[in-house]
Amino acid sequence: MHRHDRFRFLAGVFLFSIAVGIDSPVAADWPNFRGPNHDGISTETGLRTTWNEPIPMLWDKTIGSSFSSFACVGNRIFTCGTEDGRQTLLAVNANSGETIWKIDFEDEYREPQGGDGTRATPTVDGDRVYILGARGTLLCVAADSGKTLWSKKYGNIPQWGYSGSVLIEGDKAIVSVGSSDGALLALNKKNGKTIWKSGDDAVGYATPYPFTFNGQRYIVGFTAQGVMIVNADDGREVWRERWKTDWGVNAAAPIFHDGHLFISSGYRTGCAVYRLKADGRSLTGEQVWKSRVLMNKFQSCILRGGKLYASDQKALVCADFKTGEEHWRQHRKRHGTLILADDHLFYLSQRGELQIGPVSPTEFSPTTTAEILSGRCWTVPVIHNGKLYARSLDRIACFDLKAK
């Protein structure tokens, strides 16, 4: 995050905290999908990672079907559900589970193969919340009340619904909506007016991903046809690579590290790393390696110490970022989700089993195994202010990770 972007973010959250009475520390906030650094890594410390008894559940509630994860700011969490045939966006008290406000914003999205409801995660920026519905409604609401401030509608719906979350980049709200509306589209976050659009690829399922390289800010779009990089200021495309996945399911978050870009997808495709270099006003990308060591259908990897960790379509895997070498693999742990906090991996299986263990390139040896949910659990959990927030399709629950 650029220095001025970090300042804007912190200032915005501070003002929002005053507006709604938040008294929690800003440093722990998790305002968007995969957290403030877009990497799935929490800065939380002092968590209890070994449990011989059930992890205390502070509250739970049924909110209707959705794959949305959580945006957590101060003492509020924001997520989505379904009610009375409509997709809903709601703000919940993080400590009690009480609903603060709830709005319906789009017709229900039905999908019998995986599950119904909103796919994207809300994004909080200062005193505003942004969400892209599965049917293409892009909404900006007041964080304190849920009042609609502006909205847009897009109709290039992919087979399994719009899934990418909104990226806030400076004064821009950036989304991937596809075709003539833009493979990547930047709107003024205050009023929804178009600033730039880039490409006309069919939309994929990934959230736009930002990174800084040689002092310039870039945005990665992982579309149905491939990966593209644009200049964040004006949307000018600087590099693209064809990346063909069955049914256009490019969904996992890209990762930029040390001049290299990692992408991954499932089915029969795999993953690759590209070495980026400046080429005038554009970039070049040289493929360093490509393999099927990681095959992420919808899961995203976590990068720690030069190693990639993911529960992909086949197993829980650790691989080397620069070489693709596999370090370890645990079978029968497929289609799970991961978050990293306090030097531990928190792995949630697709059936709701939580395993916690030290992050290591040599093995995954859980110190805790606990059944915390039931039903389909494809949503990545979030750790915020010592609490773990997790969900199945229709139920959300909060667990105390600092209880003695």
Image (cartoon, rainbow, N blue to C red):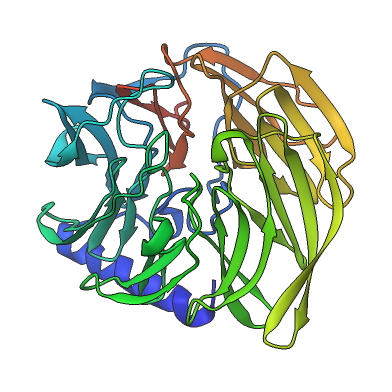
Q: Which of 264 and 88 is in front in this view?
A: 264
Judge whether 340 appears above or below 151 on screen.
above
Q: Where is residue 190 in the image (x, y as percent from the top left)?
A: 23, 73
Image side of residue 158 versus residue 60, left or right? right
Q: Which of 229 and 303 is in front in this view?
A: 229
Image side of residue 119 versus residue 250, left or right? left
Judge whether 147 appears above or below 234 on screen.
above
Q: Tell me which residue sits at (54%, 79%) in the image.
A: 236
Q: Tell me which residue sits at (49%, 76%) in the image.
A: 235
Judge whether 333 appears above or below 94 on screen.
above
Q: Where is residue 324 in the image (x, y as percent from the top left)?
A: 86, 43
Q: Nearer the viewer, residue 227 or 143?
A: 227
Q: Which residue lies furthest to the bottom in this view?
A: 280
Evaluate whether residue 298 shows in this view.
no
Q: Which of 79 and 161 is in front in this view?
A: 161
Q: Tell me which residue sits at (66%, 18%) in the image.
A: 333
Image side of residue 193 versus residue 329, left or right? left
Q: Where is residue 145 in the image (x, y as percent from the top left)?
A: 10, 53
Q: In which quarter of the image is the N terminus?
A: bottom right
Q: Quadrant of residue 342?
A: top right
Evaluate whether residue 47 shows in this view.
yes
Q: Please state the total of marks drawn on the protein image.
A: 0
Judge whether 300 appears above or below 333 on screen.
below
Q: Where is residue 138 in the image (x, y as percent from the top left)?
A: 26, 54
